[in-house]
Image: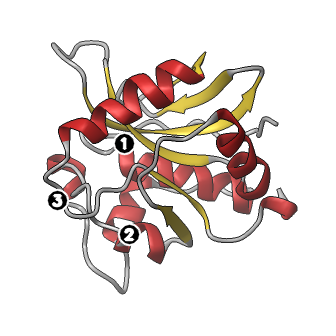
């Protein structure tokens, strides 16, 4: 299963979380979403500073406010990812990722737009102002990057690595 998700680039070095929310909301609503408006969060907590400082890895509020459900940290199998993508649509995914122009892998959010034949389809809001699309193996994305991030955040009380729309993708 693979979804046609709009690619939205992050506008700041730490705005991947907002751009990834915008991509999934854009897919769901067939509309354009501005990551800076998601960060402004009208009527709620202002997340604009998180565009510069990054999102707290335990912060569920901005995801839930935008209609996302958070999955508990787990070591996912290919069949579990297939089921999540098939049922909920694109996934909001955290990992410890090597980024162009950055000396070492850093925590980063991307969107899983599909999963077929062991290949994960990614919409990446990096680089700033352009973004990118690519495929990587399940092993690279989920074992190599997501679980590695989890290993570095063992002291975090309730980190978020995977989220999706709270309702089924039957409409998508």
Residue 61 located left or right of residue 69: left
Q: Residue furthest bottom?
A: 43
The residue that mark 1 highlights is 16
Q: CA distance from mark 1 to mark 3?
A: 13 Å
Q: CA distance from mark 2 to mark 1?
A: 13 Å
Picture coordinates of residue 89, whole percent (x, y):
72, 51
Picture coordinates of residue 171, whole percent (x, y):
85, 63
The crowd level at tag 1 (other Cα within 10 Å; few <14, some 14-19, many 20+) is many
Picture coordinates of residue 61, whole percent (x, y):
36, 74
Instruction: Name which of mark 2 and mark 1 comes first in the sequence.
Output: 1
Residue 139 visible, this orientation: yes
Picture coordinates of residue 14, whole percent (x, y):
24, 41
Q: Which residue sits at x=19%, y=37%?
A: 152
Q: For numbered disc 1, what is the local secondary structure?
A: helix
Q: Nearer the viewer, residue 44 or 59?
A: 59
Residue 86 located left or right of residue 132: right
Q: For numbered disc 3, what is the local secondary structure?
A: loop
The residue that mark 3 highlights is 49
Colour setup of the view: secondary structure
The residue that mark 2 highlights is 62
Q: Mark 1–mark 3 contact, CB under 8 Å?
A: no
Q: Is residue 47 above or below residue 92?
A: below
């Amino acid at each position: 299963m693979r979804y046609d998700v709009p690619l939205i680039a992050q506008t700041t070095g730490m705005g991947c979380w907002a751009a990834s929310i915008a991509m999934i909301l854009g897919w769901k609503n067939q509309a354009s979403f501005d990551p800076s408006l998601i960060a402004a969060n009208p009527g709620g907590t202002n997340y604009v500073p998180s565009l510069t400082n990054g999102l707290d890895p335990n912060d569920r509020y901005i995801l839930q406010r935008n209609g996302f459900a958070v999955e508990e940290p787990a070591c996912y199998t290919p069949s579990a990812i297939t089921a999540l993508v098939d049922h909920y649509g694109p996934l909001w995914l955290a990992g410890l990722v090597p980024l162009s122009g950055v000396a070492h892998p850093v925590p980063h959010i991307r969107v899983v737009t599909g999963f077929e034949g062991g290949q994960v389809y990614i919409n990446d809001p990096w680089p700033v102002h352009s973004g990118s699309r690519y495929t990587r193996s399940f092993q690279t994305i989920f074992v190599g990057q997501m679980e590695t991030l989890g290993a570095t955040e063992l002291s975090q009380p309730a980190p978020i690595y995977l989220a999706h729309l709270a309702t089924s993708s039957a409409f998508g």
